[in-house]
Image (spheres, rainbow, N blue to C red):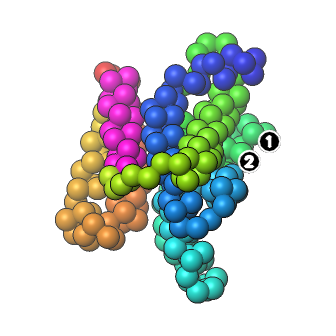
Amino acid sequence: MKFRAFRAAFPHTIPVLTGYLFLGMAYGMYMRVSGFAFWYPLLMAVVIYGGSLEFVTVSLLLSAFSPVSAFVMALLIQARHLFYGIAMLDRYKGLGWKRFFLIYGLTDETFSIACTAEPPQGVDRGWFLLSISLLDHLYWITGAVSGALLGDLLHFNTQGLDFVMTAMFVVILVNHLQKSNKPYTALIGLGASAACLLLFGAESFLLPAMACILALLTLFRRPIEKAGETA
């Protein structure tokens, strides 16, 4: 049962594998050139497991000790996960002990897959979702450690590697649009994000956009479900 779930989950995580390996390697190299031993990115990839926050943590570790500032910054950067958690309440319900790791491993990319991917017939849903989260976490750890180990050997300009994350989200979105008979959720997300970007600017639009998307999806949940059934 576990192996079948693992095998069924793997194809869904291939876009994350590509993105996490490259971005994780960039992060590991960044840690090494900043003067940290290779086990720092390993430890943070296991414990923190938040790509954008881990990059910011490098500057926090190099700056003056300020736990309050670090807490506020971490909360602001990762606050979007509150909306992810709310959206996954029903999907993670009744999964027993598995839900603890599922909650911990709910990154942006894992959420994008787990909220739509369905296990094949005969595959346990709990093990399927757990396999997705576990695979994504292992990809990130592998990338971070590989970059840390190669950091002393390779020296090149890593500017632009963070675009891998954007490209990965585009691939996941295209894959979702191809498989889903309900593109309305994607259109709501794009429209709300574009509107909030114009209203609040690039530095502050994320949280208002997430709140707006959550409100719109809640408001139009029944019409979207009916339209999907019709399609």
In the rendered structure, does residue 171 fall within the stretch colored magenta? yes
Question: Based on the displayed image, in which of its 4 quarters is residue 139 positioned?
Answer: top right
Is the residue 211 above or below the residue 216 in the image?
below
Residue indicated by mark 2: 100
Question: As drawn, is 95 to the left or to the right of 173?
Answer: right
Q: Residue at coordinates 23% horizontally, 56% vertically from top-left?
A: 194
- Nearer to the camera, 85 or 39: 39
Q: Are marks 2 and 1 in contact (CB under 8 Å)?
A: yes
In the rendered structure, does residue 70 fall within the stretch colored magenta? no
Work out which quarter of the rendered image holds the N terminus and state it: top right
- Nearer to the camera, 115 or 10: 10
Q: Residue at coordinates 56% horizontally, 60% vertically from top-left?
A: 32
Task: Report x, y in % for residue 155.
Answer: 44, 52
Work out which quarter of the rendered image holds the C terminus and state it: top left
Q: Residue at coordinates 66% horizontally, 61% vertically from top-left?
A: 37
* Mark 1, other Cα within 10 Å: few <14 / some 14–19 / many ≥20: few
Q: Residue at coordinates 65% horizontally, 55% vertically from top-left?
A: 38
Residue 97 tag number: 1
Question: As drawn, is 22 to the left or to the right of 97?
Answer: left
Q: Secondary structure at mark 2?
A: helix
* Mark 2, other Cα within 10 Å: few <14 / some 14–19 / many ≥20: few
Question: Based on the displayed image, in which of its 4 quarters is residue 57 positioned?
Answer: bottom right
